[in-house]
Image (spheres, rainbow, N blue to C red):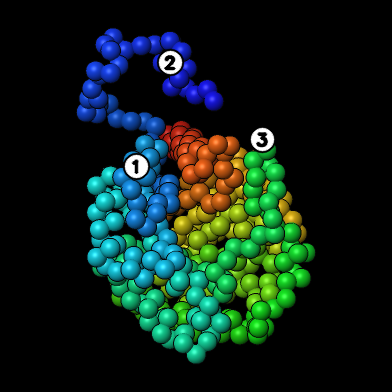
Amino acid sequence: MANQQAYETTWGFYTDTVDGASVSVSKRRRTCHDNPNGLRDGGPQISVLCSPDPKPEELQFIAQMGVQRVFTWLTGDSAHEHAKKDHLQAIQARIQGAGLQLESVGHLGLGKNASIILGKDDRDKHIAEFAEFIATLGAIGVRLTIFTWEATGKVFSTGKEEVRGGAVGRAVDASVLEQLPADGQTYSDEALWENLQYFLTKILPHCEKHKVRLALHPNDPPIPSIGGIPNLIRSKQAYDRVFAMANHSPWIGMEFCCGCWLEGGDKFGNLLSCLRAFSSDGKVFKVHLRNVTATLPAFAETYIDDGYGDIAAILNVLNETNYCNTIILDHSPPFVGDNTGSAATAFSVGYMKGALRMAQYHQTKVDARK
């Protein structure tokens, strides 16, 4: 496949003045000019997922995209070891050595814990583990973690669907999910609301003590229930109820998932107006940016610039509401020949940065005319 570097070098459009084999790489030069192309300090910032034990090449790739913040998830059998203070401090030092900041850490076994969500007999043990994890994050200066009210710990799909250019994205057909049988006990909405109230009452004092915020991600897909378990967080009203039951604590907010909002359509709430309201109130701790082809009952995930969601309008709302937390890429189809997902990440980050920078540029012009 042709690429820009081959176009410029191998194909003879330019050449070094010395034998390429003997060319040394100079240190980056200091510039005497400010860079006008970066995102404004104090405004929205892009964050990119890194592995819980990142290699130098992974962090270098993120830095080359002009991103300064990263987040990670602790998953699988290694999550317990990776959640220890010594390990988190070691990877934090590695990340900082690459010129990056670790802004949030999620723990899949705690942030999507069936015992906590379903109110099982051992939930207090898991809540205590969550509290210990929060204390560890606070001790190393990481101020955000994520949780969902999804007892299975899964994001459900029903297959894959072809999107732009023959790419393959996650697909969901709600009629299929609605037919899934219950796996054991069924639960009512109110039972899960009571369990959420119990969890927040127990955990929020630890968040306040250690200065670590909780961001609640919605259920995906946002349909009433799957397999006998309700999906509580599927509307703007659900978030209102969560914040009210927490007495509007500053330590509980939302991971505003644009993909889920787009999937739910009007039943979830108008994306732009809800984003504006929650961001203005300081309740958006992180934004998940994703695009889909349609609302439920059936949709596919597609490239960030290919769905029905207006990404530029979303980013403009964040800019206008003085949002100063992070925006992350959510699910995206891979590009052909890219087994790591790096191409899709770089493409999406570039699109997000460009749209944000343009919103900031126009805001500067508007402010200058006032």
Q: Name the residue under label 3.
A: 165
Mark closest to the chain's N terminus, 2 or 3: 2
Which amino acid, mark 2?
Thr
Residue 140 visible, this angle:
no
Q: Which of 81 and 201 is in front in this view?
A: 81
Cα distance, mark 2 to mark 3?
Answer: 28 Å
Q: Is mark 1 on a helix, strand or loop?
A: helix
Of mark 1 and mark 3, the one earlier in the sequence is 1
For the residues bearing labels 2 and 3, Cβ distance under 8 angstroms = no
In the displayed structure image, the side of residue 369 where residue 96 appears, left or right: left
Q: Where is residue 12 in the image (x, y as percent from the top left)?
A: 43, 10
Q: What element carries label 2?
A: helix
**Left or right: residue 348 compared with residue 260:** left
Where residue 10 appears, x then y in whole percent?
43, 15
Residue of label 2 = 10
Q: In this view, does 333 lie above or below 252?
A: above
Pick the front one: 198 or 221: 221
Residue 219 appears left or right of 249: right
Instruction: Characterize the local packing of mark 1: few (<14), some (14-19) or many (20 or more) Cα atoms within 10 angstroms.
Output: few
Residue at image coords 68%, 51%: 160
Where residue 121 appears, x then y in whole percent? 50, 90
Instruction: Provide residue 82's location: percent of width, then percent of height.
Output: 34, 65
Please state which amino acid type lies under the numbered disc 3.
Gly
Crowdedness near tag 3: few (<14), some (14–19) or many (≥20) residues, C-alpha within 10 Å: few
Indicate which label's residue lies in the foreground, 2 or 3.
Answer: 2
Q: In which quarter of the image is the C terminus?
A: top left
| Distance (Cα) linking label 1 and label 3 | 29 Å
Which badge, 1 or 2, comes first in the chain's sequence?
Answer: 2
Q: Name the residue under label 1.
A: 57
Left or right: residue 99 compared with residue 329: left
